[in-house]
Amino acid sequence: MIKETWWQLANLLANEWKGRRQRQVHFVTDSANWSFKWDAHYIATGLGQRLKDEVPILTTPWHLRHQVILFGNRYPWFFGPRQRLHRSNTLFLTWFHGDPADPDANMQAMFRQLPKALDPMAGVVVTCQISRDILLGCGVAAEKLITIPLGVDLQRFRPPTAEEKKRHRADMEIPDGVFCIGSFQKDGTGWGEGLTPKPVKGPDIFLETLARLTIPRNRLMVLLTGPARGYVKQGLERLGIPWRHRFVDDYLDMVPCYQALDAYLISSRAEGGPKALPESWACGVPVVSTRVGMPADLIQTGTNGLMAAIEDSHALAKALDSLFFQPELHQKLRLEGLNTVAQLDWTCVAEGYFHMINKYF
């Protein structure tokens, strides 16, 4: 009995020493083949190159000890068995967005847990100043907060040639000569038709904006991607605005969709990104946005984009009209957007994460 206990203790101590000597960064996300997965891929790859060590991507980190763990998706932390995680680990979390007024049950559950749920974190990444201010208002310590924006793969997301754009539009049945506005998000509740709107994403503002446009209807089209778009589709039918809905099975299939556009409209009431901002810019697409998330930090109205107050559909429509009727403005915003997005390549974003965690090695 004594011998068996001794071997158990020796094994425990050996594992403990091994964990201390083999301190490593682990990136936690979910298993969905979509945005979070690709964020994890790019950040982990960039960190691995800087650390000269592999950064494993996990969905279940609860067994780790003496490691640096970066929760790239906050849901495993807020809704997982976090009490099981050993206190020897150094923890970080990325908080993309969230509004205390959002009635979504999961969002409300996370805000009820603040700031206590983030107390164990050595650092909390926010993607924009608005998200930082919200967490500060919820009692999260200022010294924990690090602002690192969302990124884009500039090798994959790039402006199309004239021939590529023509080919993509033909493939999506977008006629020559129409002004195509993009909206690539999930803005309906659930995973079905999405006939009930998600107010935080502003699908009602999107439709109000399009209703105010003076662009001739025969020169206008909307390209949608993402699930649960039924509310917007029905609204476009009522407005008599033609639309296409492109279903994509893989995140990287979004590139031709952006390359087919003439403008992108963000009508949200709250965002942490959205990733549509850098992705549109990278593909040479001018952006019109409400003052949310990263647009509020990065858009200089009239220089690299156009921005309006939240719910101001009149100003949003005026901005889109100007892109149609003023080709020189469209070209200016296109070029300045390409200049701005150069700082948002995932290699730059991963560098920000590296500087955040490097002192823990």
Image (cartoon, rainbow, N blue to C red):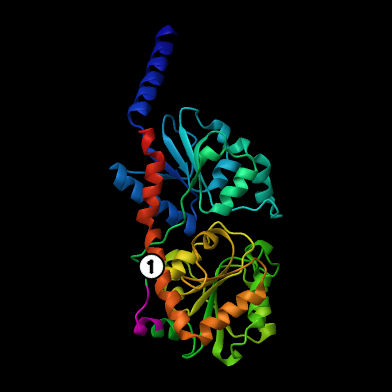
**Where is residue 337 shown, x and y percent of the image?**
43, 70
**Where is residue 352 shown, x and y percent of the image?**
40, 48
Task: Please report the bounds of the magenta region as a residue range.
Answer: 159-165
Q: Residue furthest top?
A: 2
Q: Is residue 201 left or right of residue 361?
A: right
Q: Quadrant of residue 331?
A: bottom left
**Where is residue 193 shown, x and y percent of the image?**
65, 70
Q: Nearer the viewer, residue 259 or 194?
A: 259
Q: Which residue is labeled 1 in the image?
A: 339
Measuring 68% from the left and 42% from the top, which residue is drawn there?
112
**Where is residue 290 shown, x and y percent of the image?**
60, 67
Look at label 1 and name its amino acid: Asn
Q: Nearer the viewer, residue 332 or 148?
A: 332
Measuring 53% from the left and 62% from the top, which residue is drawn there?
274
Q: Nearer the viewer, residue 342 or 251?
A: 342
Q: Is residue 20 above or below residue 263?
A: above
Question: What secondary structure is marked by label 1?
Answer: helix
Number of numbered labels in the structure image: 1
- The image quadrant where one finds the N terminus is top left
